Image: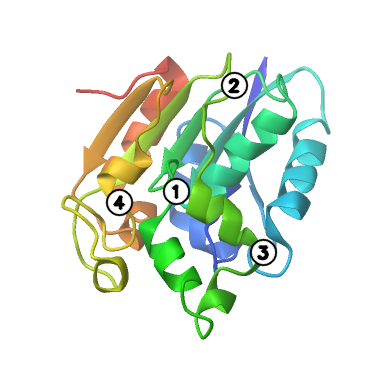
């Protein structure tokens, strides 16, 4: 069976941000494509519909999802809305599955609410639970450099935007910490290796 990986970028990013990670996954033998979506002005409703259409486009293949930050939330929200959407696994990199303190802090001030746009509720609340029947692995960064630490007073450890405790969720298959910033997760060779490891085996390498 063919195996395809759909990549989902985070808020205020475009598909190009996933290029380095994409290259690593292609080298591991997977067909890779990126879902480019309007994270602020379109929001998760539009993104989840687009993802569902992308996953169902071809038959006879196993589809995996890899999302950075908001992208991981969109992936799990799509699976909540459409159980059984994919046969493969999900990897979330730096995704605030329990909700983001930084997003809630931004939403508390009228002058900064626009930053999270239509993705505000999903970022603030998280996904609540994992998709039943789908193995989900989470990679969290622990290098605390970024504005999130100042905006929200994040507890250690954190990646500058998302705290490690915000990436944990009951029902995930595995969790792994890497010394990287939030954006740095996209360029980390260690994160890329662990992503491929989870796609292949449903567990991170230790």
| Picture layout, residue 173 above or below residue 8 | above
- Label 1, secondary structure: give it: loop
Residue at mark 2: 88
Residue that numbered label 1 is attached to: 99
Q: Which mark is residue 188?
A: 4
Q: Please state which of residues 165 and 173 is positioned toward the viewer in this rendering.
A: 165
Can you tell which quarter of the image residue 76 is in? top right
- Nearer-N-terminus badge (2/1): 2
Q: Is residue 72 left or right of residue 36?
A: left
Q: Residues within 10 Å of mark 4 (few under 14, many from 20)?
A: some
Q: Secondary structure at mark 2?
A: loop
Q: CA distance from mark 1 to mark 3?
A: 15 Å
**Could you tell me which secondary element the residue under label 4 belongs to?**
loop
**CA distance for labels 3 and 4:** 29 Å
Looking at the image, which residue sits at the far bottom? 111
Judging by the rendered image, the residue that carries numbered circle 3 is: 118
The mark nearer the N terminus, 3 or 4, is 3
* Mark 3 Cα shell of 10 Å, populated few (<14), some (14-19), many (≥20): some
Where is residue 67 shown, x and y percent of the image?
A: 52, 45
Q: Earlier in the sequence, mark 1 or mark 3?
A: 1
Q: Residue at x 52, y 28 (%)?
A: 129
x 53%, y 82%: residue = 110
x, y percent for residue 24: 43, 43
Q: Nearer the viewer, mark 2 or mark 1?
A: 1
Mark 2 vs mark 1, CA separation in Å: 24 Å
Precedes in sequence: disc 4 or disc 2? 2
Q: Residues within 10 Å of mark 2 (few under 14, many from 20)?
A: many
Q: Earlier in the sequence, mark 4 or mark 1?
A: 1
């Amino acid at each position: 069976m063919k195996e395809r990986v759909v990549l989902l970028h985070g808020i205020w990013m475009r598909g190009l941000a996933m290029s380095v990670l994409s290259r690593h996954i292609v080298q591991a033998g997977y067909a890779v494509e990126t879902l480019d979506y309007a994270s602020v002005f379109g929001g998760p409703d539009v993104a989840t519909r687009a993802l569902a259409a992308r996953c169902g486009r071809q038959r006879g293949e196993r589809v995996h999802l890899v999302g950075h930050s908001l992208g991981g939330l969109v992936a799990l929200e799509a699976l909540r809305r459409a159980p059984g959407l994919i046969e493969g696994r999900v990897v979330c990199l730096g995704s605030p599955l329990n909700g983001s303190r930084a997003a809630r802090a931004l939403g508390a001030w009228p002058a900064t609410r626009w930053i999270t746009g239509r993705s505000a509720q999903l970022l603030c609340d998280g996904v609540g639970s994992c998709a039943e029947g789908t193995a989900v692995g989470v990679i969290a960064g622990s290098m605390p450099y970024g504005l999130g630490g100042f905006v929200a007073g994040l507890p250690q450890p954190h990646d500058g935007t998302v705290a490690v405790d915000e990436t944990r969720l009951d029902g995930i298959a595995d969790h792994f910490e890497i010394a990287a910033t939030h954006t740095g997760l996209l360029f980390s060779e260690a994160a890329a290796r662990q992503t491929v490891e989870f796609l292949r085996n449903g567990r991170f390498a230790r």
